[in-house]
Amino acid sequence: DLIGGYYSNYTALADATAPQTVATGDTVAFLWIQNTDATNAVYINIAAGTAAAAAGNIYVGAGETWYARLGLTLMGSVHAISSASTVNCIVCALMDDVSV
């Protein structure tokens, strides 16, 4: 999965408020990815398929940025893989915690 871990709620948080866990059933309305790698690309699949260097996948080249309004795509449907080695990316998303 491209996004995992925790995120902050859109409401004001107190220092003692724990972050919320990303779940595969949460939805993504907007996704922004910046590939900060100097040489390797990233392939992204937003249709619950396997991310690969193949037709139907989104290609984000080294040093490139990609973004899109996704229309409430499930978090578990967003996958990514690098073209080689490990690639560092900055990922920002507008998400909805559907359990609330």
Image (cartoon, grey):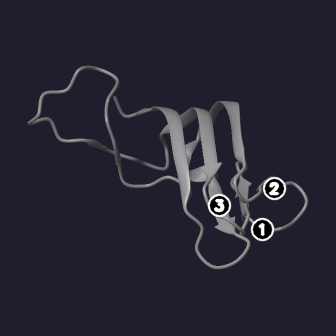
Check contact, mark 1 vs mark 2: CB within 8 A. Answer: yes
- Spot occupied by residue 30 in the image (x, y as percentages of width and height): 60, 31
Q: How far, Cα to Cα, is label 3 from label 2? A: 9 Å
User: Which residue is the site of mark 2?
Assistant: 57
**Relative height, residue 17 to residue 56 (above, below):** above
Q: Is residue 71 left or right of residue 74?
A: right
**Tag 3: amino acid:** Ala
The three-letter amino acid code for the residue at tag 2 is Asn
Q: Is residue 52 left or right of residue 2?
A: right
Q: Residues within 10 Å of mark 3 (few under 14, many from 20)?
A: many
For residue 40, above or below residue 4: below
Quarter of the figure with residue 4: bottom left
Q: Residue furthest right?
A: 55
Residue 96 point in image, percent of width and height: 46, 30
Q: Residue at x 28, y 20 (%)?
A: 11
Could you tell me if the residues under marks 3 and 2 are in contact, i.e. CB atoms within 8 Å? no
> Residue 79 lies in what quarter of the image?
bottom right
- Identify the amino acid type marked 1: Ala
Residue 34 appears at what percent x and percent y?
62, 48
